[in-house]
Image (cartoon, grey):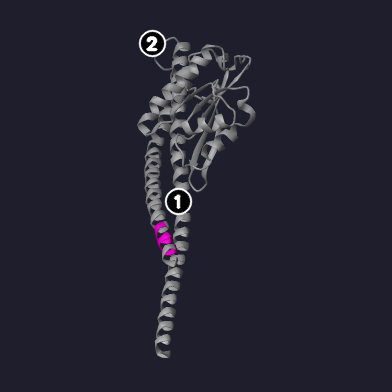
Amino acid sequence: MMVERLAEISAQIQNVRQLEAVVTALRGIAASRAQRARSLLDGIDSYSAVVSRAIGQALTLLPADFRHLPERRRATTGVILFCAEQGFAGAFSERVLNAAGGDLANATTFLIGTRGLVIARERGLNPSWSTPMASHVDAVPSLANNIADALYAQIASGTPSTVQMIVPRSISGVGVQIERYSLLPLDLARFASDSETLPPLTTLEPRELLERLTAEYVYARLCEAAMHSYEAENQARMMTMTAARHNIGTRLVTLGQREQQLRQEEITNEIVELAAGAEALADR
């Protein structure tokens, strides 16, 4: 019986060590992907800044009261949710859906992330449109294009008139935070341009130029949001795997102590049996 229990403990230790190897590998992959995403964020931010400056310059070609045109009646709202593509990321997708709150009930919802879609449906939510999250950084531009196409298709049909994004971001020293941004309509007042700068030379009619720059800006913001979400998901997975590895280490220590205890009990029993046998021989 003692031998069977000891063999069982040894088998458990072997299984836990194999799990530890898997967890360590997943953590390393997630860390590598997060680092790769961070290295590209500065370039995306610079691209967005260039487009913003171009919009500010294009606005100088339009009438002074263009920025103050009355807003259209806001009939419906669109919400873009960036969730997790895969598991082992803790409550990543749940936090994104919680941040949306009750806004999803009457909104046109665009949901990115296969794992997030599963969780949304478990909550009784059926997005208007969904797509898998990018599985590597090179797929982010294509993902942004797909979201933009779906967004413009919905806008062309009359809904939504305003669009917001709920984006997870990884902040150094803080962790993953869920943030909300307004994407459309653009607040033209924030695209300031130096009044002393000479008007840009262009072959396009000013309104058409502004429309094209707006589309470019929306694409840049979608790229930025997707890359932040990709980094945050992998950061969340890395943190989850770190916690799992800590728990595995604790479990290995417990099993090791139990194995040692059983071995000591086995040795003690053997000594007792030998002593009893020696005493019986001495009595004879």
Q: Which residue is mark 2?
A: 203
Q: Is residue 82 above or below residue 128?
A: below
* Residue ID at (44%, 80%): 272
Region of the chain picked out in magenta, as a range? 5-11
Picture coordinates of residue 129, whole percent (x, y): 50, 22
Instruction: Tell me which corner region of the image, top left, top right, bottom left or bottom right, holds residue 101.
Output: top right
Query: For the residue carrying disc 1, how many other residues have a C-alpha within 10 Å: few (<14), some (14-19), or many (20+)?
Result: some
Which quadrant: the C terminus? bottom left
Q: Is residue 2 above or below residue 33?
A: below
* Residue ID at (43%, 38%): 231
* Residue ID at (47%, 58%): 251
* Residue ID at (47%, 19%): 150
Q: Nearer the viewer, residue 239 or 161?
A: 239
Which amino acid type is marked by label 2?
Answer: Thr
Q: Secondary structure at mark 2?
A: loop
Q: Is residue 6 magenta?
A: yes
Q: CA distance from mark 2 to mark 1?
A: 56 Å
Instruction: Answer left or right for 7 relative to 166.
Output: left
